[in-house]
Image (cartoon, helix red, strand yellow):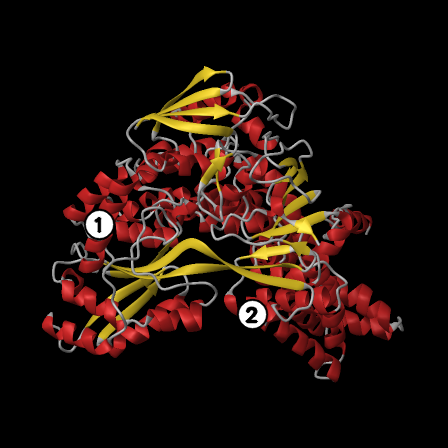
Amino acid sequence: MLAFAIRRVVLAAIVAFAVSIVGFGLLRLSGDPAIAMAGPSGTSADIAHIRHEYGFDKPLPVQYWNWMRRAVSGNLGDSYYFRMPVTTMLEQRLPITLTLGVCALLFALVLSLPLGVLAALRPNSWMDRVALTLSVVGQALPSFWFGLMLIVLLGVMFPILPPSGSGSWQHFVMPTIVLGYYATPAFMRLTRTGMLEVLQSDYIRTARAKGLPRWRVVLKHALRNAIIPVVSLAAVQFGFMLGGSIIVETVFGLGGAGYLAWESISRADFPTVQAIVLVYSGFYIVLTLLADLANAWLDPRMRG
Amino acid sequence: MNKKIVSCVALLALSLSCLMVSPAFAGKADDTLVVAWPKEVPNIDAYFSDIIREGVVLNYYIWDTLVYRDPKTNKYVPLLATSWKYENPTTIDFDLRHDVKFQNGQPFTADDVVYTINWAINPDSHVALPSYVDWIAKAEKLGKYKVRIITKHPFPPALEFLADVIPIYPHEYHAKVGPQGFALHPIGTGPYKVTKVIPGKEVDLAKNDAYFSGSPKGKPHIGKIVMRVIPDKSTQIADLISGQVDWIYQVPIDQAEKLKTIPNVTVKTAGAFRFGYLTMDAAGRSGKDNPFTKLKVRQAVAYAIDRQAIVNSLVKGVSKVINSACSPMQVGCTEDVTKYHYDPAKAKKLLAEAGYPHGFTTEFYAYRQPEYAQAMMGYLSAVGINTKFQQLQYSALRDKIRSGKVPFAFMTWGSNSIGDISASTSAFFEGEADDMARDPKVEALLKQADGTVDKTKRAALYKQALERIAQQAYWVPLFTYSINYAFSKDLDWTPTNDEVFRLFQAKWK
């Protein structure tokens, strides 16, 4: 187990390093940051000045090395645009993104687990069809469109929720639905498949034969086993939701790290984008690592 | 099992952390004007935020400048200065008001002007756009209420820059807290003071009751102004209709027309400095055999496009067709140049004379409003010019233009609301990286005009340059842009043509 864990941690570190290089390289390919920073009104003298000031005239490996050296010591640099340490900005904005991510994950689980169980109990019944339809729709709806439709419905036609902002819990309702719904199909399908498989296994038949109540068999015996892969999927989906929140935060004007990422990409604010890529991939890598370790701990066959 | 309960409770607690109290009201009832901003200002400090429109505009609320451009007459009127006089072409003396106080109670004096300007021009201050201030050599104190500004060279648009982008800061306070502290708790003399800054979300302003009477900006009326960042235009519109927001701008024309039918919304349209143009690689940097190096081809492009029809059916608003390579609102710009009226037959004839009887195929770039570009592509293909269209991000396209890889592009230019032609024509035709014409004659004329203080001589030189640009058809100037504003019916406010939305002059009805 320890050897497996060490292997996994080393692999995760290599992945993090690779992501930082790829992220750095892709950003540099996306255009001259000096032009974006000077804005539409910047003259070529302004741009030359910025290029020198921020060291864009140095070779790429040197730029990467300088960034990496500081990043390892916890200094992610100053945002070109805000002229503020990126870490301060992330401290201000990550809580919004994480709140949204957690709310959306909970929403997705609360919606998909019962649906998945019901669908598995009566395969090919009308309930199964409804659950299937819901999941196909969830997968197919573009989240920006779904978000706007919800705003029109709940913000304008029946004004019960504020269309944008992040000042109160009401502001999080619509974003949570939009972001969570997108993750629902995967959970539901996995629960359904897992339940179908487990329900046909011998120990369930034994449990039934013992005369246990049906709900007890389903919830205590079957679901507890069927849910294990869902837990590891949830870890991955959470990382995915942080990415998805870029669009949702923009539509609902939440002003979290996702919106910051979107803004920073469009104005080539490299240190900010780079830091967000690093933090997001960090979340993703750590969660996947934890899920791997948890699985290996639960199931010794996976320690290979 | 217990672990599960603990983790569930932890998750719930985290998700309930969004239960924060916040007043989300807007409107007349609580004297709070909520304004939707599409972009976040990088920093409240005007010298760092003037790279975006919202930053330039916010500067008018919090601070005052030495002079003020009256948006109705485009004349410079006294603001912090009561009068000014050119001692010689590089020296301007200003007399200052005696009755102005900063929002922290400190009196405004010559020391503040001298300190602010000398701080801004110091390269160590790293202001966002050095070109806004680097024409100034230094500022000197001549008396408690008298200052002198010395420019490095004769700089005719000095007052324009002093009015737009050079706000005056309180010298003691700024020196004490430094630029970082100042950005968090800014102090100015302006009609509104900053009460709260939530990065990424909003800037809250409150009326400055002690604002000096006699300011051309007028005394502020509305108690509070909240500027909220809402990036998505559709969300902004939903917020406006549902009353969460009182004021939005840059509304696309089709949406603006629909908003006119909503009973609690007023829609108004005003002009802007921004104009659109087609630029062509006359200098042949993208390839020597490039058709646009031929005068007749460039003229054919100008004749081929029905700009009036595009304005009538797509751009709309108060937009107008332009013929000169500048904004008609800018000092020094004249429309009295060679004009190309829509004439596809003539365009075809010119193409044939230039050696392209069957037309040619070219790359065509744009970064915004692909629908305008597509309309132009239709007109161009009708005369035989086939285009391979590519839409890029602004910075990527400008980069490509600067490295000489773009033969033909639809561009726009906002001059950052600088009401002087040196901020438009001179920026593109003086042989710098953006210059796709590289005409030494135009360059010489513009450079001479830029440094000429005599207004009549200056205007004559610019006219010669503009006429040469028009004759050579280096650009096809297209049209000016309009800005649509939509706001609550309760609000009494009129937009101006300079895109500086002066909501400090707004009242409730």
Classify mark 2: helix, strand or loop: helix
- Observer-side mark, 2 or 1, equals 1
Classify mark 1: helix, strand or loop: helix
Distance (Cα) linking label 2 and label 1? 39 Å
Quadrant location of residue A295?
Answer: bottom right
Q: Write down the residue under mark 1.
A: B465
The chain identifier of the residue carrying mark 1 reads: B
Q: Write down the residue under mark 2.
A: B257
Q: Earlier in the sequence, mark 2 or mark 1?
A: 2
| Residue lying at 31% horizontally and 47% vertically, measured from the top left | B332
| Residue lying at 76% horizontally and 77% vertically, measured from the top left | A121
Residue ranking furthest to the top: B143
| Residue lying at 80% horizontally and 47% vertically, measured from the top left | B6
Disc 2 residue type (three-letter): Glu
Residue A275 % position (x, y): 50, 42
| Residue lying at 74% horizontally and 52% vertically, measured from the top left | B28
Residue B120 % position (x, y): 43, 27
Q: Is residue A77 visible?
A: no
Disc 1 residue type (three-letter): Ala
Both labels 2 and 1 in a single chain: yes
Residue A85 % position (x, y): 53, 33
Q: Residues within 10 Å of mark 1 (few under 14, many from 20)?
A: many
Q: Nearer the viewer, residue A143 or B482?
A: B482
Q: Is residue A20 visible?
A: yes
Q: Nearer the viewer, residue B158 or B206?
A: B158
The chain identifier of the residue carrying mark 2 reads: B
